[in-house]
Amino acid sequence: MATEQADGLAEASGSTPGMPQLNFDHWGNQIFWLIVALVAIYFILSRVALPRIGAVLAERAGTITNDVAAAEDLKQKAVEAEAAYEKALADARVEAGRIVASAKAEIQADLDAATAKADAEISAKAAEGEKAIAEIRANAVKNIEVVAKDTAAAVIANLGFNADDAAVDKAVATRMKG
Amino acid sequence: MAVETAAAEGEGGLVFHPMDQFIVEPLFGDGPVHWYTITNATLWMALAVVAVVALMVLATSRRATIPSRGQSIAEMAYGFVYKMVEDVAGKDAVGFFPYVMTLFMFIVFANFLGLIPMSFTTTSHFAVTVVLALAVFLTVTIYGFMKNGTKFLGLFWVSSAPLALRPILAIIEIISYFVRPVSHSIRLAGNVMAGHAVIKVFAGFAAIAVISPVSVVAITAMYGLEVLVAFIQAYVFTILTCVYLKDALHPGH
């Protein structure tokens, strides 16, 4: 290394082996242009690039915060909406129950009325039927009486007796009762 | 290097000039290099500035809330360095953020531009890294005294150590403090220069047909390593800058 350094120093601006880094003739040039480059970069960064990027990052952070807040808000609203929906549903259930109960009561009343009416009709029909049967039965007895009287009168006549209507009636009536 | 070259030339006409890539020469003409001459170093520093402008200004010009690819990278670089300054140097050091960002962007772009074949690597020169390191050293020292006055000297007086040890520790601390710019600059230039020189040496071997496949593989592997080194050295330089700034802001242990 020492010899190389000597080479580099001795042979100024030469391309012979050695370390060009240690050729101090070129240091002034490099240092000058380095300072120019650094100052240029410093001003570009501090005046333009860094404030701009900082602003963009801050704006993005703001946007994200706002969006998160908005999302939180919407979530809250959704929860509220769900609660409202649940309440409406429960109310509707209660209302429906009430309607069902009242409808049931109404139907029951109708049914009872209809049943009562039907019962009345049935009993009326039954009474009517009984009356008809009684009538029929009465008619039948009467007819039997007539037939019995006629038959008795005919039998008596055939036997050669003179049928006394009153006696026949009486006999028939007695027999019928017996 | 001179010995190596001589030995190689002795073996079989192989020509090794691993250090020629670092020669500073005028870009136009063939004259002497004055301090104002536009040289290849000037060109590649200017390209680094152009690259910084392209990434940090042009790519962010849309100021999009949803960033494009370029803007994403610029924002990542911003966040990366900002967080480093805040975490390492402390929250009150964010005033130095543009300065640290300047160092990081220049070094990272100079390193990566230097990886382009046939390019000139400005950060491989001690002239460049010494200026960068001295700038940090002077900033830390001057700002440290301005902000803390004589309390800044507490940096060298380890009050947590036993009293008898303190003078010895003070000497060690002072030496280490003044070695900082040296190690800070040589670390960067040394790493970059060594990698580039090794690639050049491997490239020299490619002239022998039998060895050339091995040589090409070795160059590829070295190149991959150099890509890592290019970023890591920029990172190391920047984080050490932050560590030193912390000393200026909060001296004492």
Image (tube, coloured by chain):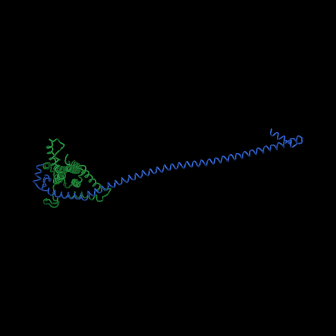
Q: Is residue A116 visible?
A: yes
Residue sitting at the far bottom: B29
- Residue drawn at point x = 14 percent, y = 59 percent: B35
Residue B194 location (% of width, % of height)? 18, 49
Q: Where residue A61 appears, x then y in whole percent? A: 32, 54
Q: Residue B141, percent across and down? A: 17, 51
Q: What residue is at 18 percent from the left and 57 percent from the top? A: A35
Q: Is residue B219 visible?
A: no
Q: Does B200 sit left or right of A143 as displayed? A: left
The outermost residue toward the top is: A178
Task: From the image, state the color of chain B.
Answer: green
Is A1 left or right of B89, judged from the image as shown?
left
| Quadrant of the frame with the C terminus of chain A | top right
A36 or A93, nearer to the observer: A93
Which chain is blue in the rendering?
A
Q: Position of residue B38 (x, y in %)?
A: 17, 60
Q: How many marks?
A: 0
